[in-house]
Image (spheres, helix red, strand yellow):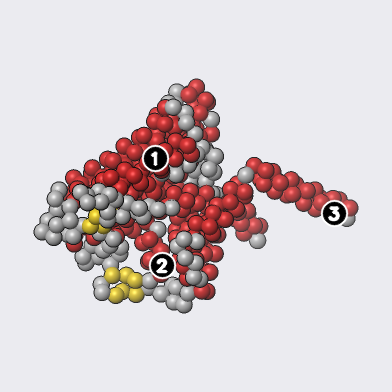
C-alpha cells in the first residue's frame, strides 16, 4: 500500500500528469457523445475511425507544437506567426509545382526544398528580431504574422487576380497529406512521428536541450558559462520556421491546393495551447517534448468534441481561448503560491490534530 502511495505521489508531481489526464478526459467525453468512437476499421484499404482521424489531423499541430516548445523555452515568449509561415511555404511549393495534369513544373523534391527553405528564412527573420534586436517575441512575430498572409497572396497571384487558390493536379502530391498506395496508415502520422523522433534524438544526444533550458531560465548565467544565448534563441526561431514549412507542406497536400487565406489559420493558438497543456511553462526554462505532443493530440480531441456538439469553426477559438486562460492561471506564480500555502495550512492542521490526540 505504501508503494502504491509513493507511486501516486511521484506520478502526481510528474510534468506529464496534466496532459495525460486531460487527454484521457477528452477521450472519455468523445466516447460519451460519439457512438463508436473507439471503433477502427479498414475501408478501401486504409484505416478509418475517430481515433485515426484525431491522430491524422493532429500531425501538423504536433510538428508546430515541437517548434513552439523550443521558442517558449528559450525566449520566454511565443511565435504567433507559425500559421502564417505555413501558408507562405505552402504557397511557394504549390506555385513551383504548377497545375498541369501532365506533370510537375518543377521537380517535387526541389519545390519542397525551396518551400521549406522559405519557412527557414521567415523563422530567421523572427529570430533576428528577437535575438538580435531584443524585440519582444510577441511584437517581433506579429510583424511576420501581419505580413505573411500578404506574402502568401502575392506568391499565389496571377495576371488576373491576387491571392487566388492554386491547385496541384498530379495525384502523387496527395500522398504526403493522404495515403501512400498500399499503406493503411495516413502519411502525416509517419511524418510527425519521424519529426518528433529526430528532434528528440538531436536534443538528447547533444547539449542543445541544456543550452535551450539554460538560456530560458537565465540567459545572463548562460553567457557566463560560455553559452551564446543569441544564437540559441535564433536557432529556435529558425527551427520553428522549419516546423511551419513542414506543416504547410502537409496542409497543402491534404487539399492538393493552396488557399493563402486559410492554410494555417488560427493554428498558432492551438500550438501555444498544446505547449501549455503539455505542462511546459510559457515563461521559459525546462521543457518536455512528450508533453507538447500529448497536448497537441488533446487539442485535436477537443476540436473533435466541439464539432460533435455543434460548435462552428468560427466559435472554436473562443472555447480554446478559455482553456488557454485556465492553463496560464494554473501555471502562474500567484496560483502556485496559493496552492503551496493551502497545502502547508492543511499539513499544519493535520499535525495539530495528531498532537492534540
The numbered dot on residue 353 is 3
In terms of sequence position, does the residue under pointer 3 or pointer 2 come before the other? 2
Q: Residues within 10 Å of mark 3 (few under 14, many from 20)?
A: few
Query: Is 232 or 250 nearer to us in this picture?
Result: 250
Q: Residues within 10 Å of mark 2 (few under 14, many from 20)?
A: some
Asked whether the viewer can see residue 40, the reply is yes
Query: Is 273 or 31 nearer to us in this picture?
Result: 273
Q: Which residue is mark 2?
A: 51
Asked whether the viewer can see residue 202, the reply is no
| Residue 225 image position (x, y, % from top left) | 48, 23
Q: Residue at x 65, y 61 (%)?
A: 1
In terms of sequence position, does the residue under pointer 1 or pointer 2 come before the other? 2
Residue 103 vs 222, above or below: the answer is below
Q: Element type at marker 3?
A: helix
In terms of sequence position, does the residue under pointer 1 or pointer 3 come before the other? 1
Query: Is 44 or 260 nearer to us in this picture?
Result: 260
Q: Residues within 10 Å of mark 1 (few under 14, many from 20)?
A: many
Q: Element type at marker 2?
A: helix
Q: Quadrant of the C terminus?
A: bottom right
- Distance Cα–Cα, label 1 vs label 3: 60 Å
Q: Are marks 1 and 2 in contact (CB under 8 Å)?
A: no
* Residue depth check, mark 3 versus mark 2: number of the one nearer the observer: 2
Q: Residue furthest front?
A: 160
Amino acid at each position: 500500500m505504501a508503494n502504491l502511495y509513493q507511486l501516486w505521489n511521484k506520478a502526481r508531481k510528474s510534468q506529464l500528469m496534466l496532459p495525460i489526464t486531460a487527454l484521457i478526459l477528452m477521450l472519455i467525453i468523445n466516447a460519451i457523445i460519439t457512438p463508436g468512437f473507439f471503433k477502427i476499421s479498414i475501408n478501401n484499404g486504409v484505416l478509418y475511425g475517430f481515433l485515426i482521424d484525431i491522430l491524422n489531423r493532429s500531425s501538423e499541430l504536433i510538428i508546430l507544437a515541437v517548434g513552439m516548445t523550443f521558442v517558449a523555452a528559450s525566449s520566454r515568449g511565443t511565435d504567433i506567426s507559425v500559421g502564417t509561415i505555413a501558408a507562405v511555404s505552402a504557397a511557394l511549393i504549390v506555385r513551383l509545382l504548377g497545375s498541369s495534369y501532365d506533370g510537375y513544373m518543377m521537380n517535387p523534391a526541389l519545390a519542397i526544398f525551396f518551400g521549406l527553405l522559405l519557412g527557414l528564412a521567415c523563422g530567421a527573420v523572427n529570430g533576428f528580431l528577437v535575438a538580435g534586436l531584443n524585440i519582444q517575441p510577441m511584437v517581433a512575430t506579429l510583424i511576420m504574422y501581419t505580413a505573411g498572409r500578404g506574402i502568401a497572396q502575392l506568391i499565389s497571384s496571377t495576371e488576373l487576380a491576387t491571392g487566388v487558390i492554386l491547385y496541384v493536379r498530379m495525384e502523387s502530391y496527395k500522398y504526403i497529406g493522404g495515403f501512400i498506395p498500399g499503406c493503411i496508415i495516413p502519411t502525416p502520422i509517419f511524418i510527425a512521428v519521424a519529426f518528433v523522433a529526430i528532434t528528440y534524438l538531436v536534443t538528447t544526444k547533444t547539449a542543445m536541450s541544456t543550452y535551450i533550458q539554460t538560456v530560458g531560465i537565465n540567459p545572463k548565467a548562460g553567457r557566463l558559462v560560455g553559452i551564446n544565448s543569441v544564437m540559441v534563441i535564433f536557432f529556435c526561431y529558425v527551427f520553428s520556421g522549419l516546423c511551419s514549412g513542414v506543416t504547410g507542406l502537409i496542409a497543402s497536400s491534404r487539399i492538393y491546393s493552396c488557399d493563402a487565406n486559410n492554410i494555417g489559420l488560427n493554428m498558432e493558438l492551438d500550438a501555444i495551447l498544446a505547449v501549455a497543456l503539455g505542462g511546459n511553462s510559457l515563461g521559459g526554462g525546462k521543457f518536455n517534448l512528450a508533453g507538447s505532443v500529448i497536448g497537441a493530440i488533446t487539442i485535436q480531441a477537443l476540436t473533435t468534441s466541439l464539432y460533435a456538439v455543434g460548435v462552428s469553426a468560427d466559435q472554436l477559438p473562443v472555447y480554446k481561448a478559455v482553456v488557454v486562460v485556465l492553463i496560464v492561471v494554473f501555471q502562474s506564480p500567484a496560483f502556485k503560491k496559493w496552492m503551496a500555502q493551502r497545502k502547508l495550512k492543511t499539513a499544519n492542521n493535520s499535525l495539530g490534530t495528531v498532537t492534540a490526540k
